[in-house]
């Protein structure tokens, strides 16, 4: 049941400090490593299988090299897998052995991955050894840094001394203020995964019609619109987010991309000029997601407050 090395706890925490609630999330949440260390967020990675070799997301996977292969090798076989229940068990146990009274997992939407189910299995095993402690699982129904925004919020509340119940209550409110929009460079990988039919893929490729997607309230992939040509994707993304955050008091944004730095720079400039965020992060899409969408994906996540 050996797990890949997760993100370590905040080194600034004293060994004599009693940790009330420890926050755990997965690598799809895209929490910047420095921020995860600062807030004490533990991150469990998913895996990517390239041909017959397994890589650990964010640990031993060269993203740039992978994206180059995906562009050059059209028959490249790539798949993803969730952490096992045993890996979650090991991480939960490590958190509790570190002195945490409660563990709160901020999870990837259960509609898109078996990760949440594996976390449930790991929590059952851990509770058998720590029956007097809490292990709570929260299905964000999100992915990407949108999910990460909730993990960051939970960690900040935990560091302020909030209880699990208080954190969960606030997460339910914040969940309604968080989301993202992402545009694809190609329909090829959606077609490979069976998410669109061959006819739709062929037609879309001929006329360069590309989807812009988000996640529904239930955590499933939801198309927002379709545009002709990749250069229109950025405008549609900013339009969508602008409608969602209209009238907000404060705003956090995150630029996401995979092998699309120049487009990401343009999106950042557009978002800053039009939306005037209080803070903006730039974070790469995890290869676990890019395996299903292809390189060139670009997106904008938001977290607004009234």
Image (cartoon, rainbow, N blue to C red):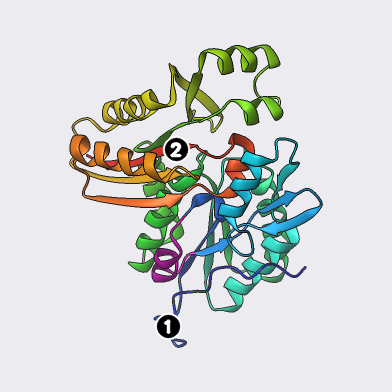
Judging by the rendered image, the residue that carries numbered circle 2 is: 298
Image point (58%, 54%), residue name = 63
Q: Which mark is residue 203?
A: none
Examine the structure image and report whether residue 34 is included in the region drawn in magenta: yes
Looking at the magenta stretch, what is its main secondary structure? helix
Circle 1 sits in a helix, a strand or a loop, which is it? loop
For the magenta stretch, what is the residue range? 31-41
Location of the C terminus (image quadrant): top left
Left or right: 150 as drawn, with respect to 203: left
x%, y% of residue 35? 39, 64
User: Counting other residues with Cα less than 10 Å from the Cα at mark 1, is it few (<14), some (14-19), or many (20 or more)?
Assistant: few
User: Mark 2 or mark 1, which has the lower sequence index?
Assistant: 1
x%, y% of residue 9? 49, 74
Q: Quadrant of residue 113?
A: top right
Residue 53 visible, this orientation: yes
User: Counting other residues with Cα less than 10 Å from the Cα at mark 2, is it few (<14), some (14-19), or many (20 or more)?
Assistant: many
Image point (37%, 54%), residue name = 153
In the displayed structure, 196 sits above or below 158; it is: above
x%, y% of residue 285? 50, 47
Q: Please state which of residues 119 and 75 is positioned toward the viewer in this rendering.
A: 75
Q: Please state which of residues 227 and 114 is positioned toward the viewer in this rendering.
A: 227
x%, y% of residue 279? 25, 51
Q: How many marks?
A: 2
Q: Nearer the viewer, mark 2 or mark 1?
A: 2
Q: Which mark is residue 17?
A: 1
Q: Quadrant of residue 196?
A: top right
């Amino acid at each position: 049941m050996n797990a890949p090395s997760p993100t370590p706890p905040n080194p600034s925490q004293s060994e004599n400090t009693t940790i009330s609630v420890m926050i755990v999330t997965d690598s799809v949440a895209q929490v910047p490593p420095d921020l995860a260390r600062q807030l004490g967020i533990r991150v469990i990675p998913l895996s990517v299988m390239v041909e017959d070799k397994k890589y650990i997301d964010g640990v031993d996977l060269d993203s740039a090299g992978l994206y180059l292969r995906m562009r050059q090798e059209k028959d490249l076989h790539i798949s993803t897998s969730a952490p096992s229940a045993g890996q979650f068990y090991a991480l939960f146990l490590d958190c509790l052995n570190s002195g945490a009274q409660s563990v709160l997992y901020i999870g990837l939407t259960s509609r898109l991955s078996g990760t949440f189910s594996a976390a449930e299995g790991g929590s059952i095993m851990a509770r058998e050894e720590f029956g007097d402690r809490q292990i709570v699982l929260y299905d964000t129904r999100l992915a990407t840094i949108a999910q990460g925004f909730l993990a960051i919020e939970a960690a900040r509340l935990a560091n302020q001394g909030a209880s699990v119940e208080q954190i969960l209550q606030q997460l339910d409110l914040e969940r309604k203020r968080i989301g993202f929009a992402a545009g694809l460079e190609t329909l090829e990988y959606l077609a490979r995964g069976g998410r669109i039919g061959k006819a739709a893929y062929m037609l879309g490729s001929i006329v360069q019609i590309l989807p812009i997607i988000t996640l529904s309230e239930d955590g499933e992939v939801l198309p927002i619109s379709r545009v002709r040509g990749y250069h229109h994707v950025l405008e549609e993304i900013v339009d969508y987010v602008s409608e969602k955050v209209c009238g907000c008091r404060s705003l956090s944004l995150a630029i996401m991309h995979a092998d699309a730095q120049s487009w990401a720079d343009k999106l950042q400039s557009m978002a800053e000029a039009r939306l005037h965020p209080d803070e903006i992060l730039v974070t790469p899409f995890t290869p676990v997601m890019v395996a299903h969408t292809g390189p060139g994906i670009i997106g904008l996540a938001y977290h607004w407050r009234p």
